Structure formats: C-alpha cells, structure tokens
Amino acid sequence: MSLTTKIETPSVTYEQPIGLYIDGQWVKGKEGKTFETINPTNEKPIVAVHEAGPDDVDIAVSAARKALNGVWAETLPSARGQMLMKLADLFDEHVDTLAAIESLDNGKALSMAKVDVGLSSGCLRYYGGWADKIHGKVIDTDPETFNYTRHEPVGVCGQIIPWNFPLLMWAWKIGPALATGNTVVLKTAEQTPLSALYAATLCEKAGIPAGVVNILSGFGKTAGAAIASHMGIDKVAFTGSTVVGRTILQAAAKSNLKKVTLELGGKSPNIVFNDANIEDAISWVNFGIFFNHGQCCSAGSRIYVQEGIYDEFIEKFKARTAKNVVGDPFAKDTFQGPQVSQLQYDRIMAYIKAGKDAGAKVETGGERHGDKGYFIQPTIFSGVSDDMKIMQEEIFGPVCSISKFKTEDEAIKAGNETTYGLAAAVHTTDLNTAIRVSNKLKAGTVWVNSYNLLSHQVPFGGFKESGIGRELGKYALANYTQVKSVRMRLGSALFG
C-alpha cells in the first residue's frame, strides 16, 4: 500500500501523505490498521490514514530520544532558528495547499483556513527568532562563589492537538518546543490528521533532522493514552476538552511525573454595557461566537447585555447573524462551514434541544442547515438563566445564550460563576469600566471592544479548569525549558 495518495479539492490537487512520520521516514503502523477521515461537507470518506498504536509511540519516542541526545543536541541554537524560519517560509509557499487541506478535512471556510496558515507561519517564524536568545543569568551571592543558570530543554515532548485548528495548534506546539531544543512526538486529532502529515513533508524540506519531529495519526484512547503515560516522554502538552485534560494529568502523575501544559475548555462571558458602540459590539459578538463554526475554546458563548440596550441589541444581533453565510467551505462568500463530525453535530443539536426544553427562547436558528453535511444554523437563545445547561456547559458549536443584567457588579458576578476561565470580553466606551471589569474577571484573556484576537507574541491560556500553563509569547518558552543552577566556589582547585 502506497504511503501517499493524490487528492483533488475544489482549489488544488496535491499528494497527501497517509503514513506515520517517524524518524524521518514514512511508515505503516505496527498493527497494520488504518482509519478513514471524513469530509464534513458531504459526509463521505476522504482517505484512509495509517493508525498509530502504543508500539508506534514507543518507536517514535526512541527516535526522538536518539535525536535529542545526538544530532539535535549538536545543532546550534541559531541553526534551529533558521530551520524554523525556513519552515515558516515553506508554509507561506504552500498556503493554497495547506488551506485546502484544512477546509477539506475540517470544514472551515477556505478564507479562514488561509488566515490560519498565515498565523501558523507567523508563530513558527516568531519562535525561530527566539531560538538563540534563550539564556540564563549570572547571580551574585558572595565574593567566594560564581553562580549561573542555564535554561535547558525538557527533553522528549509528547504533544496532542485538537481538530478545531489542526495546523495552527501544530505550529503552537512545534514552534516553542524546537526553539528550546526539545524533540517532539505529536499526535493529531483523529478527525483531522491530514494537514499535520503534509506539514511533516515541509519539516524535511526545512532541513529539520530525522527524529526531531515525529507525527502520528491515531486515537486518544490508544495513541494519546500511550503518550500521556509513556515513561520515555518528559513533558506532555494537550489542547482539548477539560474531561480529557484530567485523564492526561492523572496519567502524567502516575507515570514519571512528566511536566504538563493543558489548554482546555471554556464558557466565556461576553459583556456588553449600555454605553458600548452597539454596532461595533454586535460585530465582535457575532465573530466571537460564530467564528470557526463556534468550534473555539474561547468562544464568547455567554452574552450578558445591560438592560438599557437589551432589546435593541437582540434585534440588531439577529439581523447581523442572518448575514453569516453557511455553506460549502470552498465557496468564496462562506463564513460558516459544517461542524467537524457527526458526533459533534449530534452533541450540539442535543444542547439546542436542552435549551428549548428548559424554556429559553430561540431568537434565530436552532435547526439543521440543509440536508447534507454536518451544518447547523447559527443559533441565538435569549431569556436564558444562569442555571440552564446551555449557559453552564461548553457547547462547542454555533450556539450562544443571551442574558440581561442591571449593574456592573451583577455582570462580573455572573461572568465569574463558571468552572472555566479561558477568556472573556468587555464592550464599553468608558476606559475606567474597561479596566475595572477586565481586572475582576477570572479569565486568562480579556478582550476589550473586540474578540478572538490572537497574536503569537501574546500569551494565551486559562484560569481555573481551563488549563495549566501558557502558550504563545515568551511565556510559552518556560513550559519547554528547565532551569539548572551551577554554583562554583572560587577558592576551589578549579580556579587555582
């Protein structure tokens, strides 16, 4: 069986790798299994890829360890940076292909997928710049001692990425790990393996040595579990649900107490005050919940609107939502494509039914869109109380709930009454209100008069059950390094 296959998309035709990428080679899984990835637009199989199991994880970890202690340890930091920058350039050169793969496999609009590719290359280029700037300090304690610190690689890093931003999460994980001198065993989401596999071919072209990056397609309960509990993996990074994050944290603790970073779920409050520019606020609220089909951990799904503009806001928000084009991701004007899978579609529709059953009012949407593919109408619920399931649990789809508030303190209290703390937003024209409320919201990111603005220079991560650690920016580097202190007694034989 060939380890590549030709795939035709509405925008490009390309060669798709379907094997496992281990130690610089394309190989079949040891168990000989494959699984199909499904096109969410038409519910038909795209291609079958080889499935990694625990034995394949073992082989990949061995390859990563060999590279860590060999060729990668001998690679200058500046050379690591040049490789990452070359990889970023290759992403830019292959933007049409990478974006088409994302649209085909994930269902996101092609225009949005191209933005993802640009953000991915920017992230890789940013961390390429950091590679030769990671250093410790000289610490003066007393005249008889010379002290310095070193920031050393953690080691072999297991990385498990989600299906909602397959390529972007690949870059978020690979960039800081390689910049700091680590090697990687990365498992894709079983729903969206294709772009990560194609990106592995670009790693080869960028000159990244064999064994430094290993890419496995597989399932969470087998390959993912093997990574989380592997005694040869020094650190695991996971982006996904809080439920799975707990199991990974437990597995890491029960194995070799490996370091863990987790970027988990969210139920983010989006607070609109009476004095907000209502047109701008509605535009950002619309983007905050319906961007990426609502399949976004930071989605602004809990919308709190102050009573003075509540009725006007709902009517204008409904009108704005009606302009969101739902359809074929390869169509030029599409904003919202299908949900990623049948399972995800069913989960979202179950939440919509729960909202209806609880007595929330459907302002718009609430039904399937079309009769083929996993499409769901953009859905707005109003009159939602804080105890309703749709206000408390992460839906991960194009569904939002609107609630009315009177005072600032009431909005802050409601916004913080959740187990999550990934993101939030404040819409107001009063600077004092913006700062005061932002400082009181328990969230890792607070947007003011905007939403879902992410930059590779700015850290991202959650409070409470939304995770551990930070991704992006300088802050992410700490997750991939460990600090060694070296202390020399000046009166020793070493100094004469």
Image: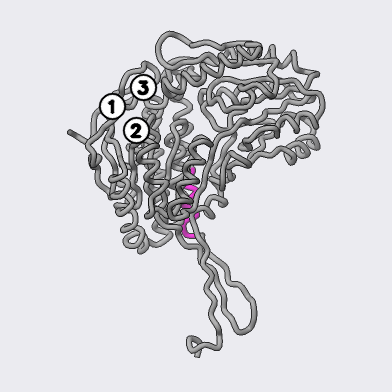
Q: Nearer the viewer, residue 102 or 268?
A: 268
Quarter of the rendering containing residue 276: top right
Q: Label 2, on which residue?
A: 194
Q: Is there any visible trace of residue 124 in the rendered image?
A: no
Comes first in the chain, label 1 or label 3:
3
Mark 1 in CB contact with mark 2 (< 8 angstroms): yes
Residue shown at 36%/33% (left/top)?
A: 193
Quarter of the rendering containing residue 18: top left
Residue 495 rendering spot, x and y as whole percentages: 50, 87
Residue shown at 48%/86% (left/top)?
A: 494
Q: Label 3, on which residue?
A: 39
In the displayed structure, 263 sits above or below 400; it is: below
> Which type of secondary structure does the marked residue at label 3 adopt?
strand
Judged from this view, the residue extending furthest toward the bottom is 496
Give the amino acid type for the residue marked by disc 3 in the picture. Answer: Asn
**Residue segment shown in magenta:** 123-133
Quarter of the rendering containing residue 363: top right
> Which type of secondary structure does the marked residue at label 2 adopt?
helix
Give the distance between the C-alpha atoms of the residues marked 2 and 3, in whole angstroms: 11 Å
Q: Label 1, on which residue?
A: 47
Q: Is residue 107 left or right of residue 271?
A: left
